[in-house]
Amino acid sequence: MLKVLNTQLFMLINAAPNTSKLMITIATFCAEYLIYTPLIVMIFCWFKRPQTRGLILKIIVTVFISLAVAAILRSFISSPRPFELAIGTNFLPHSSSNSFPSKHATFIFAITFALFYGLKNQLNQQKLFISCLVIGILVSWSRIYLGVHWPLDILAGILTSFGCAYLVNKQWHHIERLLLKLYSLRPIVVSKLKIIKYVTKNSN
């Protein structure tokens, strides 16, 4: 039942063979390049708005954990892409790999949900959240529209990122403490590496 619904929804969204080149170009941009927009904004904010670094760090941790969970799910659940099963029309060249859950959806919605949990009634943050939500919807739509993902892949990516963002938000004070501890160990690690390098150099 779920498989049938997934296929029917895919066929409803997937572009028809006679779709205009303009629509395919727009969808390709959304599927391949639009996802980099939040990264550019985060890099800009990291250097130009130091007060946002705490939130950016939270986003990075959420993305990392979400993609790690998605990778684990991919290793256990096999889901061929639509074009591998000769279903619908494919407009985006892609390797034949497991599609469940969508890494693109997981990535962009991890950023979106991290922003949602990080909202502090500031207009700029609200605008960023809404922008990321729109980008997430466009990226998700385009991946189905161009024939490289099933709707269920996208849904799984969204749920994965939502769950991870929720857990990171709940445990952030513990995670932040751990990160600070690791950062404080940095000089010790660097000095030990220098000693190892010195000993290795002299032994040769």
Image (tube, rainbow, N blue to C red):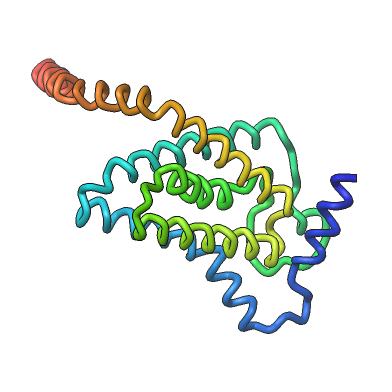
Q: Where 17 falls versus 142 (above or below)?
A: below
Q: Can you tell which quarter of the image residue 64 is in?
A: top left
User: In this view of the protein, can residue 173 be seen by the observer?
Assistant: yes
Q: Is residue 137 left or right of residue 191?
A: right
Q: Is residue 150 left or right of residue 59?
A: right
Q: Nearer the viewer, residue 178 or 84?
A: 178
Q: Residue at x 64, y 76 (%)?
A: 24
Q: Is residue 2 left or right of residue 171?
A: right
Q: Residue at x 22, y 54 (%)?
A: 49
Q: Nearer the viewer, residue 28 or 137?
A: 137
User: In this view of the protein, can residue 204 be seen by the observer?
Assistant: no
**Which residue lies most toward the front here?**
121
Q: Residue at x 75, y 67 (%)?
A: 14
Q: Position of residue 168 (x, y in %)?
A: 45, 32
Q: Nearer the viewer, residue 46 or 192?
A: 46
Q: Where 76 falls versus 13 (above or below)?
A: above
Q: Position of residue 5 (x, y in %)?
A: 86, 52
Q: Position of residue 98 (x, y in %)?
A: 68, 44
Q: Position of residue 26 (x, y in %)?
A: 57, 76
| Count of marks overlaid on the render | 0
For the C terminus, which image quadrant? top left
For the N terminus, which image quadrant? top right
Q: Residue at x 81, y 64 (%)?
A: 11
Q: Is residue 96 left or right of residue 69?
A: right
